[in-house]
Amino acid sequence: MTRPRTVVIVGGGISGLATAFSLREKATQAGVPLRCTVLESDSAWGGKIVTHRVGDIVTEAGPDSFLSQKQAGLDLCTKLGLADQLINTNETGKKASVLSNGRLHDLPEGLLSFAPKQLGPFFQSGLLSWIGLARMGLEYVVPPGPSRGDESLADFLRRRFGALAFERVLEPLMAGIYAGDAEQMSLRATFPRFFELEQQHGGILRGMMAAKQSAAPNSTGRPRRTMFVSLKNGLGDLVTALTSRLEQQGVELRLGARVDALRVRSHELGRWMYDLILENGSAISAESLVLATPAYVSAELLRPLTPIAGGLLDLIPYASTATIAMAFPRSQTSAIEGFGFIVPRREQRDLIAATWTSLKWPHRAPSDQLLVRCYAGGVGREDILQRENQELVATLREELAGICGITAEPLYTEVNRWWKAMPQYTIGHLDRLVQLEAALSRYPGLVLTGAGYRGVGIPDCIRDGAEAAERVLQSLLGKGHHERERPPDR
């Protein structure tokens, strides 16, 4: 009997679990016997995917949804038997707002995808002056920038749409996804699609119009999906289903298993055996190793093997954030409608965004309550996270009162802090990833995956986990170092 090949995955967030799932799937298809172990230092699986259920209230401590346009998330839900649990955002005439000069202004539906369905309300909102609107429309004739070199997201958006549109609309929409500072964010690493549209079509609006004209109608019979989707009872069900399936497939899942050090020893000519020393003094060895840990954790493990890789990983900064859930009596918040609002940096607020969770998603709170989810922290705005829970909640309640008139006493509150949780793709990020690949090339079977590299969203992590699994399998089959292709569109 062929001996099973051994793989250890360090990190039990969505990236590590998705890697294990894809690896089992690919190994079975290839007829490769496999013994796979996933190590997680925490006491629970899923990383930042954490769903809390308190009575009829469902809150998400971390992400509350994922993009349906990125197929990897939908595909995994289907494979896990969760397709019938996928839910769209609620139907509503009003979607989201942006704070400008202390007042909320409606954002046209589709602005996030640069395909607004109704421009009339946008023109009438007062969010931008006529000069600002005219400059934004001139994006259609702004010439493309250079095809070489990286550019900050801020410079790109200002160059194409003007400073006013950037500051009041685009900055909170784009930078908010990464809890980052658009002045530091790499265009090519965060929104490579924008760069490609500019180079291929001459601009964003031109490219979006061309894509709309060439788009084929949905003839697949698949359910219509809104831009963001979730699961009926919370995203925690994705983690539960994933770990259950892995256990059924014979994957060993070990919680509370912190890795203190990594060693390598010669296995055969040109190959290594990876030895992991755990905090409790035990050790585990494998022919292939996947580090699905934050970049700063992977840096410490890899530094003794390759200081260059450790140094490059150190150059990926992380921002700290917090989500604060509050439930209010609906009778005292009846004027609230839509999905929530975002806050540009120029407003200099502690609150950076708020979602009316029970209006955006079904099955999130009793009908007589409004469930609100507030966001705080991010690059340059992390000081507020040092405040005690009571003070933090009081600060955000004061902001909600001033912005949208919510003065009721909350029936329920919940604070979730995420320290060093959001990786920042700063200018030059993709070049550093190329250098990182080169530094690790002498260690076949050693693979990095996770939100720190090629996408922070749930589908991005699932897709990157599948690519990591493919690289592991190729290494186990002795097919050499598998080079990555360019990052996919986001």
Image (tube, grey):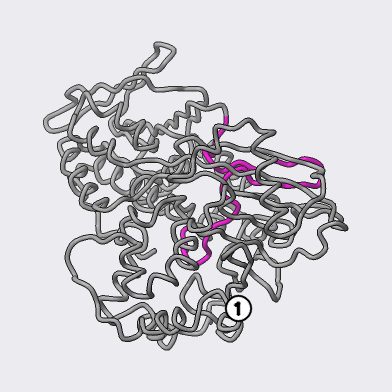
Of residues 315 and 35, which is closer to you in this image?
Answer: 315
* 366 to 97, vertically: above or below: above
> Relative to 229, is 112 on the left or the right?
left
Of residues 296 and 96, which is closer to you in this image?
Answer: 96
Query: Is residue 60 in view from this perspective?
Result: yes
The quadrant in which residue 36 appears is top left
* 27 to 488, vertically: above or below: above
Magenta stretch: residue 68 in it?
yes
Of residues 365 and 412, which is closer to you in this image?
Answer: 412
Q: Residue furthest top?
A: 281
Q: Where is residue 21 in the image (x, y as percent from the top left)?
A: 46, 45
Q: Residues within 10 Å of mark 1 (few under 14, many from 20)?
A: some
Q: Where is residue 87 in the image (x, y as percent from the top left)?
A: 66, 62
What range is drawn magenta here?
44-72
Magenta stretch: residue 352 in it?
no
The residue depicted at 62 percent of the width and 42 percent of the height is: 61
> Which quarter of the rendering shows the C terminus?
bottom left
The residue depicted at 36 percent of the width and 63 percent of the height is: 191
Q: Position of residue 286 (x, y in %)?
A: 31, 28
The quadrant in which residue 319 appears is top left
SS under mark 1: loop
Q: Where is residue 419 in the image (x, y as percent from the top left)?
A: 49, 35
> Which quarter of the rendering shows the N terminus?
top left
Q: Name the residue under label 1.
A: 125
The quadrant in which residue 198 appears is bottom left
The residue depicted at 50 percent of the width and 79 percent of the height is: 129
Three-letter residue code for mark 1: Ser
Query: Is residue 1 in view from this perspective?
Result: no
